[in-house]
Image (cartoon, rainbow, N blue to C red):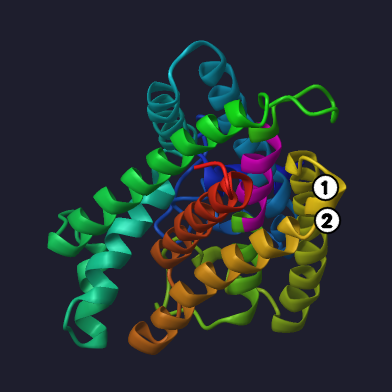
Amino acid sequence: MREFKQALYFFTPLRFNRGTVRTQEVKTIGVKSSTAPSPLTLLYFGPIGAIIGMLVGLVFWGCDAVLPPLVAASITVAADLLLTGALHFDGLVDSADGLLGVLDQKRRLEVMDEPTIGAFALGVGCIFLILRWAALASLGSVGNHLGGWVPPVGGLGRAVWLIGGLWCLSRTSMAVFISVFTYARKEGGLVGAFLSQNNKTKRLYCVLAALIGLLITVLMLYGWVDNLAHLWWIPVLIVSSFVGALGVVALAQKRLGGFTGDVLGAAGIISETIGLIVAVGLAGAGKW
């Protein structure tokens, strides 16, 4: 249960223990340094992502049933920012300034720590908010073309399964990146609490986290697919979303010498957004 809470603290603003000390080293996880996250926490990344995604999907499904797609999509984007405390969006805009500017490695890391934002952050942030809003609005329109978002899977709207699957995949990718790539900062930061763990142990739990997250992702995306002839949509969504996230971390590895918590947040946002756009293309093919 402790590991589940730590994973929840990592991805949301929720805190169940008001007396918890939030140190610099693990300030965004919300636990004392003496109780830093164990590798088991990685196993909960995918499930936590699925829970957040399903909540976001339920908001979209409910709003889309009574409101125009554009309004429903706007509320859904806002709900996602609220549920995650805008942690990943903050990582996206910070990473934009740090990775896209013409700076040396040390200055890139300093820029990403600054509370202010620059032109790259503003531009990238606006672009991705618009892309997410447009993709969700388009999914609402596609759902109407397909006869609604209600398949025979559990009676839930198809959007719930789609968004839950994509959000699960993005957090699962983060668990993999934490275990495989180099951390760019010497100490502290968003994921600093994981760095003291033995590499072999981390990689073992990375494999388990990937398998658990991938299984949940496939099952949830299966709930989104409208018929068996479209099962090939599932690997297309998974590969395109993961490659998008991997591209961000690979760029950070080249320009920062590794990843940071901000980079993981950016990778998550980009993974989800690519997944939504690809889903629009797959489900809407021939219907526009």
Q: Secondary structure at mark 1?
A: helix
Q: Which residues are magenta?
A: 160-169
Residue 124 image point, x, y percent: 26, 58
Query: In this rendering, would 105 be left or right of 164?
Result: left
Q: Are dots 1 and 2 in contact, CB under 8 Å?
A: yes
Q: Secondary structure at mark 2?
A: helix
Q: Residue at x 19, y 54 (%)?
A: 122
Select label 1 or label 2 by which is in front: 1
What is the quadrant of residue 233 in the picture? bottom right
Q: Is residue 16 visible?
A: no
What is the quadrant of residue 223 in the picture? top right
Disc 2 marks which residue? 215
Disc 1 marks which residue? 219
> Identity of the amino acid at label 1?
Leu
What is the quadrant of residue 180 in the picture? bottom right
Query: In this rendering, would 98 be left or right of 12?
Result: left
Residue 240 or 170: which is nearer the viewer?
240
Q: Residue at x 48, y 76 (%)?
A: 247
Residue 225 image point, x, y percent: 76, 44
Q: Is residue 168 magenta?
A: yes
Q: Looking at the magenta stretch, what is its main secondary structure?
A: helix
Image quadrant for the N terminus?
A: top right
> Identity of the amino acid at label 2?
Leu
Cα distance in 3D space between marks 1 and 2: 6 Å
Residue 50 or 278: which is nearer the viewer?
278
Residue 260 or 165: which is nearer the viewer?
165
